[in-house]
Amino acid sequence: MCQNPKWGDGEFEATVHVVDDPGFAGVSTEDLPAAVGADTCPYPVFVADRTTMQADHHALLAVTTATPELVGDDTWYEEMVQYGGQFRTVPGGVSEIHANLYVSNMDFQEFAGLALDDPEGVHRSF
């Protein structure tokens, strides 16, 4: 289901693709881009996995669905996945990540780097 919820006093729209399907259980992060249709799905995908449900911080796993073919620039792609192409973020960080990626204020790897700076490896929001 695709939704366009308004946020920031209703002046901004976030394109959200909610997946609530047990068929995705056990899909690896490597297989996730193909499973969600990376050519039509904005990245990153935020996954509520077992760690999300069990950890006190309930941090979602942010996974890039970008591929070298989709990006079209091998150097930029390598920079994007330099931290493994995934990181964890508290749920409150999802909107700021989406907004900053959308306006090209920050890149995926910058958020991944911020998460690595945290003792638990979680982006805690600004």
Image: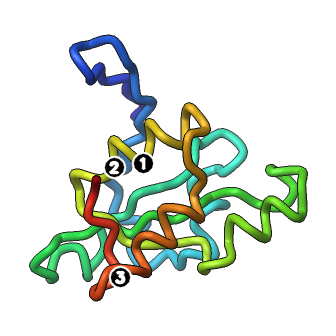
Which residue is denoted by mark 2 in the rendering?
94
The percent coordinates of residue 11 (x first, y second) are: 33, 11
Secondary structure of the residue carrying numbered label 2: helix
Query: Callout 1, which amino acid?
Result: Ile
Q: Earlier in the sequence, mark 3 or mark 1?
A: 1
Mark 3 and mark 2: Cα distance apart in space: 15 Å
Among all residues in the image, which is located at the extreme bottom? Answer: 119
Given this view, does label 3 or label 2 mark the residue nearer the observer? 3
User: Percent x, y for residue 48?
Assistant: 30, 66
- Identify the residue position indicated by label 3 in the image: 121
Query: Going 63% across and 76% down the picture, which residue do you hit?
Result: 30
Structural crowding at the residue carrying mark 2, measured as other residues with C-alpha within 10 Å and reported as few (<14), some (14–19) or many (≥20): some
Residue behind mark 1: 97
Question: In front here: 38 or 55?
Answer: 55
Residue 88 drawn above or below residue 105: below
| Disc 2 from disc 1: Cα separation | 5 Å
Up-down relation of residue 5 to residue 39 (above or below): above
The quarter of the displayed image where residue 104 is located? top right
Which is more N-terminal, label 2 or label 3? 2
